[in-house]
Amino acid sequence: MNTGEPRWADLDEATVRVRAMQTKLHHWAVSDPDRLFDDVFNLVHDRDFLTVAWGRVKSNKGARTAGVDRRIPA
């Protein structure tokens, strides 16, 4: 059913798009060292960046140990 909600990409799709954006940002930063990146907030809230971040957190060693709430993330 199409609810109109944006779809969350799977980790592989998201990783490809995040790496492309990181490459683009790197080229911009190298070509213009004085450039200001004033739209970082939108990157932090981008679904692809969040998907990749969650994949990294979920796959690290600490993800398999309980936190202060004694729960392990799903």
Image (cartoon, helix red, strand yellow):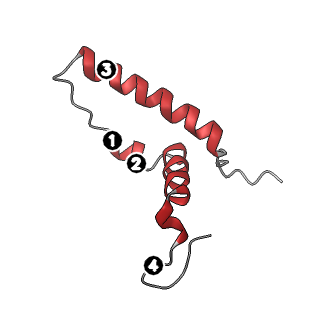
- Give how far across and how far down residue 66 sits, in percent: 50, 78
- Picture layout, residue 40 above or below residue 25: below
**Is disc 1 in contact with disc 2, using a CB cutoff of under 8 Å?**
yes
Disc 1 and disc 3: Cα gap in Å?
Answer: 14 Å
Percent across and percent down for residue 47 are 54, 47
**Image marks 3 and 2: residues in contact by CB distance under 8 Å:** no
Which of pointers 3 and 4 lies earlier in the amino acid sequence?
Answer: 3
Circle 3 residues within 10 Å: few <14, some 14–19, many ≥20: some
Q: Which residue is mark 2?
A: 44
Type of amino acid under label 1: Val
The residue that mark 1 highlights is 40
Q: Earlier in the sequence, mark 1 or mark 4?
A: 1
Closer to the camera: disc 1 or disc 4? 4
Measured Cα–Cα span from mark 4 to mark 2:
24 Å
How far from the left and from the top, in percent, is residue 56? 50, 52
- Label 4 or label 2, whichever comes before in sequence order: 2
- The quarter of the image holding the C terminus is bottom right
Residue drawn at x 44%, y 50% as measured from the top left: 45
Q: Secondary structure at mark 2?
A: helix
Task: Identify the mark nearer the N-term, 3 or 2.
Answer: 3
The quadrant of the picture occupied by the N terminus is bottom right
Q: Compared to 69, does 14 lie above or below? A: above
The span from disc 1 to disc 4 (Cα, nearest Å) is 29 Å
**Residue found at the very far bottom of the displayed protein:** 69
Instruction: Please report contact status of discs 4 and 2: CB closer than 8 Å, yes or no.
Output: no
In this rendered view, identify the residue nearer to me: 53 or 21: 53
User: Which one is closest to the eye, mark 1 or mark 3?
Assistant: 3
The residue nearer to you, when weighing 4 against 60, is 60
Mark 3 highlights which residue?
A: 28
